[in-house]
Structures are given as structure tokens and as C-alpha cells.
Amino acid sequence: MQHRIGLIEDDPIIGEALSERLAFEGFACDWYRDGKTARRGLAQRRYSVVVSDINLPDISGEELFGDLLAGGQTLAPFIFITGYGAIDQAVRLLKLGAHDYVTKPFNVGELIAKIRGLCERQQPVADADARLGISTSMRQIEGLLPRLAASRSAVLISGESGAGKEQVARALHRAGDPDGKTPFVAVNCGAIPENLIESELFGHDKGAFTGADRERHGVFEQADGGTLFLDEIGEMPPSMQVKLLRAIQDRAVVHVGGAKSRKVDIRLICATHHDLKAMVETGGFREDLYYRIHVIHLHVPPLRERQEDILWLAARFLDERASKGEARRALTAEAERALTRYPWPGNVRELHHCLERASVLSVAPLLDVESLFGTSGLRPTEGDAMRQPLNDHLQECERAYIRRALNECEGRIADTAALLGISRKNLWEKMRKLEMA
């Protein structure tokens, strides 16, 4: 899906140049020349990013932004364009929840880079599930999916509980069926009572057992032509493993209580948080079944080993909630640091629960550390900070120190530079390097 940018700019030269550049970069762009038409457009259409001048002919960008917030409207990330004389106003907007600002004269390339970065972190809802993450490990998995989709080989996905194994399975299915014409059927092998698992997998005929008042297709038949995802395959009872092996080998099933063999055409994906090889050695899992499902292996690393994905996942989750009509929430800088420092033993599932709880309980548009971790008693410790590379930790310290100085000087760059004992140019360079400007 093409990202759509809302541009609010009354200057015809700047507006035309920016709208043309955005179109050239592959974005869709709606250009509004005053606050009134912008307000109407923002109410009717969803944008990935909004770029707005602070000085508009009928209403200031600050008033427009404040009105939109007061109205409870779901807002895209705002980037404001301002002159050096209005930086105090831009800082106030950041405190209200705006994402960023640029000062005139600005570098168009840098502005486009900011927009593109926001678009990557805040995927449109229709596209969000298509991405697995921005970390190297998840991008590598994504890169393999088209090749895997071209084959019908069985795939085994391993990883800790909550790490996102089902999301990888769904992404593989989409890679082989981008139009969504074939079924994706998921079943948790550990959640089915042992006395019902054969019927759940292979189906049953009418009268096969007490309560079987009609014929029922199992998940193998339901997935015919598409993908069958057997989650937690390591929980499969030993008595069922031999029957599962036969169904996979023959690509055919026999209903419980029936005699007819029914052919099925499926892509098989299995997942587990167990070490199946170790289970084979101890007799807990059949060796022949292991090699049948272990043709191609994908490992999903735990969230603590792919910290780059934490804020990307958080932004995507908050976007999904906003798309359902809830107030748009954002994270304070301290909250973002806390999220990246916490080890997430429950992985992506725990991160989602944390953000959901904070979104429900907090009434503020900005989620802080207290709203994220205070209610659960969980907090990142100083030991968690030691998981960071030294350079990242030093940058965080420098960023926090500059931010405190800016707050003390109420955003005045000249005064902040004097307080820090550096030149204004040096301060701007540091802020740009630290992604603060």
C-alpha cells in the first residue's frame, strides 16, 4: 500500500516543491493551503504522516493541532515546519505530542528521510502484518520467504513462546498466496484434549462416537489447497505421532469411524518452543516424524536479542489500536528507553499486553514509564542497561542531558548552547546526530 502524506502549507512555492518531491519519492500527497480545508481533509482521510507549517493564513498550526487533539481525533505523526523565531512554539508542540519539527530553510532530503522513517515504523494497517520486523534477523527471515513459498517443503519454526512464530507462518503463507485465495488453518496441538485430537486433525464420520451427529472435516481437509500450521508440535501425544506421520507422508487422511482415504494438498508448517532433537534422543518425539517436518528450519530469536524491533512493534501496536477508533497514543522518550532496556521474558506477547494495559488505564496521550510498568510492578533495572552497547548508552546519556538543558531554557537554542558551553552550530549538529532535530 502506498503511504499517503498530508501537507499543510500556504506558501505556493514550498507547497508545490514538496508535493512534487513527495510524489517523486513514491508517496501519495494531499496538499492543503489553509487550516480549514486541512481540518476537513484530516477528518475524512487517514495519513501516514502530516507535515504542517506553523504559520497558516486562517489558523496557526499550533491551534489546528490543539483542536484536533481536543476533538479526540486519531492523528498521524505530525512534523511541523517553523522559522528560527518560532522554535519555542515548536517545542510546545512536541510536548503536546507532535513528533518532530524542521526549521526554515530546511534540507528537503532530511525531511523526506524523517517521513520515510516514520512510515517504516508506523505501517498502514493494511500492510502492517506483511512485515516481521526491522532487525537483521527478522529481515533475513523475510528475505527467505519468497524462496520457501515457491516450494512445498515442510517448514519447522522454532523459538520461545510469544516470539512471533505464528506471524512468520502467516507471512510465509501470504508470500505463496498474496491474493488470499487459499486457507490458512492454525491449530495449537497442546490445547486439544488427547481424546479429541484425532478427530480435530483428521475429521470424523457421523456416528463415529457419542455426540458425532454429523460428518466433520478436520484441519487437514480445512486447509486443503492452502497452509496447515501445527503450533506446538512438540506437545503432540506419542500415540498420535505415528498417525500424523502417515497423514503427512501420504497427504491423505481417514476420518475417525470411516474407511475412505481422502487426499489433501497442503503446505505444512510446524512450530515449537521445545528442542525437538533432544526430545528425539530421549524418546519423547518420533525420529521419523522429526525429519519429515524438519526439512527447512527457521528460528525466531527472542525479543531481547532483537532490540531494534521493540519500538517498531510498539508503534505498530499503538497504530492498530488507533485505527480501531481509540485515541492515538505515543511514548515518551523515557518510556521508549525503558521498553528497550526491559528483557521481555514473554517476548512480543508480553510487549503487547504491556501496551494494551497502559492504553486502557492511562488517560494521557503520552504513555510514560509509570503507565507502562507501574501497574505490574515490573521495571527495567540498572542491570538491563548493561545489555546496551557502550556507544548506545553514551548517546542516551547525551540525549537526556541535552533534553534537560532544553527544558530548563524552555527550548531556546542560544541559551541552551550557552548553558552547555558549546556553540549553537555544535548544538544543532549534536541534536541532528542524536535524532532530536
Image (tube, rainbow, N blue to C red):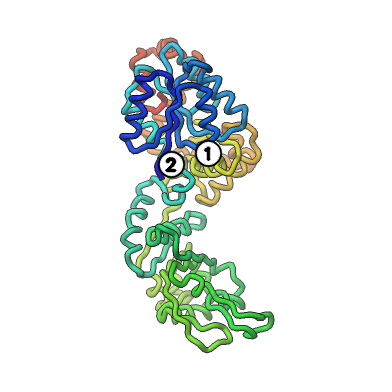
Location of mark 2 (residue)? 387
The residue lying toward the viewer, choosing from 317 and 400, is: 317
Q: Is residue 197 above or below residue 32?
A: below
The C terminus is located in which quarter? top left
The residue lying toward the viewer, choosing from 394 and 358, is: 358
Q: In this view, does 195 lie above or below 309?
A: below
- Asked if residue 24 shows in the view, the reply is yes
Q: In this view, does 230 lie above or below 414?
A: below
Looking at the image, which residue is at 35% across and 66% down? 296
Identity, as a three-letter code, of the amino acid under mark 2: Arg
Name the image quarter holding residue 112.
Answer: top left
**Left or right of 249 in this view: 74:** right
Looking at the image, which residue is at 60% across and 34% down? 370
State the SS at label 2. loop
The N terminus is located in which quarter? top left
Q: How crowded is mark 1: few (under 14 residues within 10 Å), some or many (20 or more)?
A: few
Name the image quarter holding residue 189.
Answer: bottom right
State the SS at label 1. loop
Where does the image place residue 422, in percent across and percent down from the top left?
A: 36, 14
Query: Which circle marks residue 381 in the picture?
Result: 1
Identity, as a three-letter code, of the amino acid under mark 1: Thr
Looking at the image, which residue is at 36% across and 19% down? 428
Q: Is residue 208 above or below residue 176?
A: below
